[in-house]
Amino acid sequence: MFKEAFCAAALGGIFWLDRYQIGQLMMSRPIVVGSVIGWALGSVETGLAVGALFEVLWLRRPPIGGFIAPEVTFSSSIAVSAAIIVWNQSHFDIIALALLSFMLFMPLSFLGSRLDLVLRIGLGKLSIPAESAILDRSKRKILLYFAASLGLGFTICFVAQVPLIILGSLVLRPLVAAWPENLVPALKLAYFSIPALGALDMLAGNFDRVSFALFLLGVTFSVCCYFLL
């Protein structure tokens, strides 16, 4: 458990930097984070299943300007890690486990937003001496402040995620063990309703015939996946 937690938190910290500190290559999207962490921990399917839920629910809420959206990179990394740790021990149904993990760790998106605010304040303080270094054309100091800003972002995410992944696994494990077998299909059906809600939320901001047709197509696809899986 500890090895998986440190590995996942390290990857989560790196992906967190992509949000607006370096790169901004969309690698911080939950579906990417979930897939990569899933691959690192031995279950790409679980990582993809959990990441997809975080992706569709907050797809229209990117952190633009001063707006701090629910931090899905942070929360999805924890949810994926805890789900895979539990799955490796119980081999519970992946779709059902993905939903349980999502519901349990979704509130951490708001904790991640608070950490995001702390990071922005810290970066703001670093920007003052960094600006002076730029004016002085001191390449060494510029590189130092740049590395310090990346180190700050990584450390905040890493330090926060490690205990949350371990604690989350300890909470999720008995929940999975106590879940009645006859209610597993209910979790699987509920899993596919969340992408439908995410698509409906997007339609609310851009409602036209094409969007409505794609929404119906998505619902049909979700129902088909449910019966096949």
Image (tube, grey):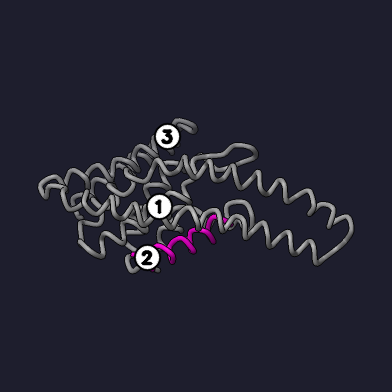
Which is nearer the eye, 228 or 180? 180
Q: What kind of element bears circle 3? A: helix
Choose top left, top right, bottom left or bottom right for residue 67: top right
Q: For mark 2, what is the residue?
A: 2
Report the Cα–Cα distance between label 1 and label 3: 29 Å
The residue labelled by disc 3 is 201
Main secondary structure type of the part rendered in magenta: helix
Determine crowd level at label 3: few under 14, some 14-19, many 20+ residues with C-alpha closer than 10 A.
some
Task: Give me the residue at 45% from left, 32% from top.
Answer: 208
Q: Locate residue 180 relative to residue 6 in the image: left or right.
A: left
* Image-based side of 2 in relation to 227, left or right: right
The quarter of the picture where the C terminus appears is bottom left
Task: Say what amino acid the circle numbered 1 marks.
Answer: Leu
Name the image quarter holding residue 35. bottom left
Q: Give, as a single range, the part of the protein colored magenta.
A: 1-17
Between 223 and 197, the one nearer to me in the picture = 197
Residue 40 position within the rendered picture, expressed as x and y whole percent measured from the top left: 40, 68
Q: Residue at x 57, y 58 (%)?
A: 154
